Amino acid sequence: MTRTLICLARHGETNWNLERRFQGQLDIALNMKGRLQADALGRELADAHFDCIYSSDLQRAVATAAPHAARRGMEIIKKPELREKHDGVWHGLNHQEVAARFPEDYRHYLARRADYAAPGGESLMRFAARVRAALTRIAEAHPGQTVLVVAHAGTLDIAWRLATAKHLDETREYPVLNAAPNWVAYEGGRWSLVDWAREENRNPVVAPYEGLDLPRREATRVLLVNPRNETLLLRFSSRILPDVEALGYSHFWGQPGGALEPGESYEACALREISEETGLEDFTVGAPIASREFPLHLPTGWRHAVEQYYLVRCEDFEPRLERLTAAEKTYVEGWKWWRADEIAASKELIYPEALANMLSRAGLL
């Protein structure tokens, strides 16, 4: 019998990890720490020999595999079947939101009920069968070889259960760390555990903002939607987001909005920013449809961003950018009305991440 050795690594950190959001199969990018973790993993595995590299096709996994692949001049073989479990309507919600909106379902999730699936999602049992089949195909395609597989926490959890013969409802002994190597073997149709990464045995990767008491930056973002269900996005120069500029982007797209002024409410900020950035005056702001909290890198330094998102229905109009402030005129480059399906299919950099999911939850996709 010939033994295949597989090194499994979870993707690096994302802002959605920090917010404890269900990413599932949404295509969320690595944050700065995640990119540093990917680089560190590449260095850690520099002396390891791999015959090939596989990855989930989602960008957070591909970007984690990329430093090692580039170092070796190897192709990354992207496999959708290595994706995270599909979380259905939970996609984009954090754990607190799911617990509040779907209390009974969330209890099934916490109990690891194998036959339970979130509405529109994938059951743990079906997910496990998918991952088992994918990893077995990879192992049997490379007898006697060593393979790197970069995927997701859920994918690695199933691999651990294959290698330890643990049932789906049993508690895992160790967490699945971001961008850490875990080793399993496949031989004669059987899986075995070689080594599993533990936090106490690893050197931590520290992002520039960690350990700092970051100034809080509260802001509003407004999704203006016209009668054709198109959403207004402004085109911004990447100069206002150093991380975006460092990644090679000249611009990105986002909603009108901005930071609260002293003593200003989120709703008042939304009214003011829309007037300044688009010229629209006759509209009302209801309750927020979403919120975000994440580390934000501005030219003036790191901030703890707290953002509220509002959906505003409006008549079709052409934004008047001449009303922008002097500062805004230096970085707002244009505008466009976008259909939700255009946003979902676009390769442009659009914020917030997974905007199409936010629009879908608002009934626009």
Image (cartoon, helix red, strand yellow):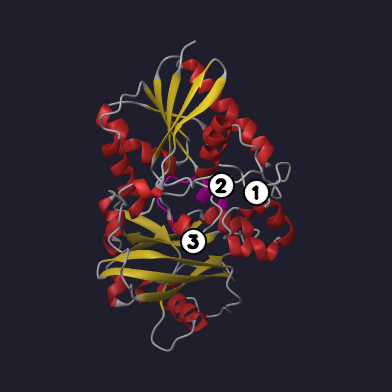
Residue designated by label 2: 24
Residue 19 disc label: 3
Numbered disc 3: secondary structure: loop
Q: Amino acid at mark 2?
A: Gly
Residue 75 painted magenta:
no
In this rendering, the answer to whether 296 lies above or below 323 is above
In the image, is residue 348 part of the stretch drawn in magenta?
yes
Marks 3/2: CA–CA distance: 14 Å
Q: Secondary structure at mark 1?
A: helix
Q: SS class of the residue under badge 2?
A: loop
- Spatial CA span between label 1 and label 3: 18 Å
At label 3, which amino acid type do we have? Answer: Glu
Q: Earlier in the sequence, mark 1 or mark 3?
A: 3
Work out how far the residue at label 1 is from the one at label 2, CA to CA, in angstroms: 8 Å
> What is the count of numbered marks?
3
Give the answer, above or below, for where 1 lies relative to 300: above
Give the residue type at disc 1. Gly
Residue 349 locus on image (x, y percent): 40, 51
Dot 1 surroundings within 10 Å: few (below 14), some, or many (20 or more)?
some
Report if the CB atoms under discs 1 and 2 are less than 8 Å apart.
Answer: yes
The stretch of residues the image draws in magenta is 339-352
Residue identified by numbered label 1: 88
